[in-house]
Amino acid sequence: MKKISRVERKMRRRRFFFRFILLISLILLVFALALNSDFFVIENIKVIGNIKIPKDNIISASSINIGENIFKVSTKSAKRGLMNLPYIKEVKIKRKFPKGIIIDIIERKEIIQIKEISSFILLDIEGHILDIADIQNEKLPLLLGLKIEDKKLGDNIFLESEIKENIEFISEGHAIGLLPKMKEINMVDNNNVNIRLIDGISVAFGTLDNVKYKLNYLNEILKNIEKEQIPCKMILMDRGDNPVVVLDEEGEG
């Protein structure tokens, strides 16, 4: 086997080095041309997954502009801007070469509203404040008595440890599908919670002790009332371990 001389090894290293430099130079040249080429100018920004938030608001919050070079877009910066919108839960931003951007979002959904003085605070299942409205949303259950002070859009009220039982009521009620059946929940006194259902039935829920058990028990009672077509006007759960179903005499007749 022919032995490679020191001079030849040195020449090989030099050739490898020059080829490496040439390759890097070509890559940088191509990148520089791409950054300044009209071929990679953004002409279309597609937004998918939005229901509540208008497309124009999403594009504006991303700070991505038509006419901008697709390589100059910072997807991390755009994502940070979008996550400042209270209704956005998750966001993915993709480049669609050569001239497109896709913004894919998952929105948060309102599940309840809280009356605070003259405003209505809309929350999602995780407790984030999505909106503060002047008019009541008739499609959402209304919660009375929960004090929310010095909170702004995007804040999470479920981080408040002193309302642990109230949070459990909301979370469990939503999980078993009972919360949407409620029209109004009065928690002015946590030892005397009262509920008014959409169908007109009033529920004296009592204390917030054993919330999960009591909500599931109430749910089963309501299922039975519906199944048996019982004319009920009130359910008393504050009179001991056994709830009392008060019949609507007019409906019964």
Image: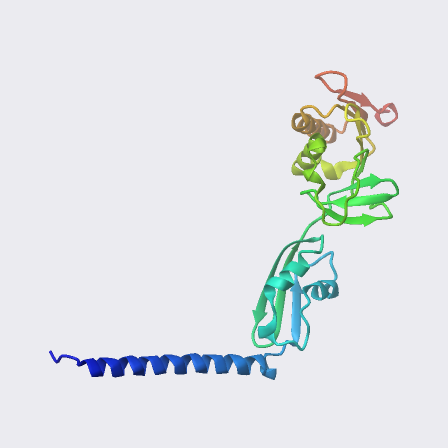
Of residue 12 and residue 170, the one placed in the foreground of this image is 12
Tell me the quarter of the picture where residue 238 sits: top right
- Can residue 49 be seen here? The reply is no
Residue at (77% x, 48% y) in the render: 152
- The quarter of the image holding the N terminus is bottom left
In the image, taking residue 143 as reference, residue 218 lies left or right, namely: left
In the image, taking residue 154 as reference, residue 189 lies left or right, namely: right
What is the x, y in percent for residue 109?
70, 49
Residue at (66% x, 56% y) in the render: 83
Of residue 28 and residue 238, the one placed in the foreground of this image is 28
Residue at (35% x, 83% y) in the render: 18
**Image position of 166 with respect to 135: above or below:** above
Residue at (88% x, 26% y) in the render: 250
**Image position of 224 with respect to 95: above or below:** above
- The quarter of the image holding the C terminus is top right
Q: Residue furthest left?
A: 1
What is the x, y in percent for residue 9?
23, 80
Tell me the quarter of the picture where residue 215 sits: top right
Tell me the quarter of the picture where residue 145 sits: top right
What is the x, y in percent for residue 113?
78, 42
